[in-house]
Image (tube, grey):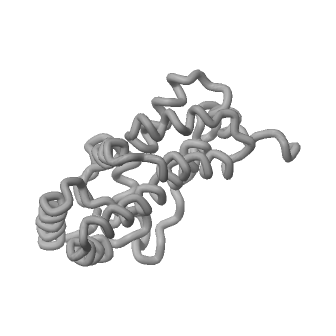
């Protein structure tokens, strides 16, 4: 493939209809402002260009856009029913015992009460214990610190999802799940 020819997933993102791409982007990040900013950047030369635009769009989100993005994420330990992406991202919680699940529920509720939004962490590759420990630690943060952490975590999630979208764009073979991290162990 010539260096100036976008990879197939990037080519799809560049040429598919605006509505189709916007729906796909909203599956990556639920903020309409983020999706629209990424759309406005088309065409992209490559995946790195898409990721750079996604990062810039996230950095430009105001409080409302960030709240909209966060509203698209289910609490840790309770992936959205019927959503394989959510289940895959949170698979570290899959084998958690009832005590750890109950503690995670309490931590999620305390976090939401303190900060006004879901506890957001890039859960890919993290164990249930690591997720719990992160929630415990972050509950002690002041709101301004937590806002920056949430934005960073959202960026990590967006990048993983966006790369997945580019790998599995219509007409592309499905991308395999990434291998589990050592903390996760084999898939359940």
| 44 left or right, relative to 147 | right
In this rendering, does residue 76 appear at all? yes
Image quadrant in which the C terminus is located: bottom left
Q: Position of residue 164 (x, y in %)?
A: 55, 48
| 55 left or right, relative to 91 | right
Q: 111 and 10: which one is in front?
A: 111
Which residue extends farthest right?
2
Which quadrant would residue 120 be assigned to in this image? Answer: bottom left
At x 25% / y 74%, what residue is drawn?
141
Q: 13 and 101: which one is in front?
A: 13
Q: Position of residue 16 (x, y in %)?
A: 62, 25
| 139 left or right, relative to 165 | left
Q: 113 and 63: which one is in front?
A: 63
Which quadrant would residue 143 be assigned to in this image? Answer: bottom left
Image quadrant in which the N terminus is located: top right
At x 18% / y 64%, what residue is drawn?
111
Q: Position of residue 63 (x, y in %)?
A: 33, 48
Q: 149 and 86: which one is in front?
A: 149
Vertical relation: 111 (above or below) 25: below
At x 34% / y 52%, what residue is drawn?
87
């Amino acid at each position: 493939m010539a260096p100036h020819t976008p990879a197939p997933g990037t080519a799809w993102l560049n040429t598919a209809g605006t509505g189709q791409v916007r729906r796909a982007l909203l599956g990556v990040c639920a903020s309409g402002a983020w999706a629209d900013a990424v759309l406005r950047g088309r065409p992209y030369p490559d995946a790195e260009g898409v990721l750079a635009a996604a990062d810039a769009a996230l950095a430009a989100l105001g409080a409302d856009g960030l709240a909209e993005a966060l509203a698209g994420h289910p609490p840790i330990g309770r992936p959205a029913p019927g959503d394989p992406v959510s289940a895959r991202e949170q698979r570290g919680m899959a084998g958690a015992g009832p005590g750890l699940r109950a503690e995670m529920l309490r931590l999620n509720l305390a976090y939401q009460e303190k900060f006004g939004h879901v506890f957001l962490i890039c859960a890919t590759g993290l164990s249930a214990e690591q997720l719990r420990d992160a929630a415990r630690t972050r509950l002690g943060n002041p709101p301004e610190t937590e806002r920056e952490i949430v934005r960073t975590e959202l960026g990590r999630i967006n990048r993983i999802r966006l790369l997945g979208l580019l790998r599995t764009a219509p007409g592309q073979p499905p991308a395999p799940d990434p291998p589990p991290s050592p903390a996760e162990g084999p898939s359940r």
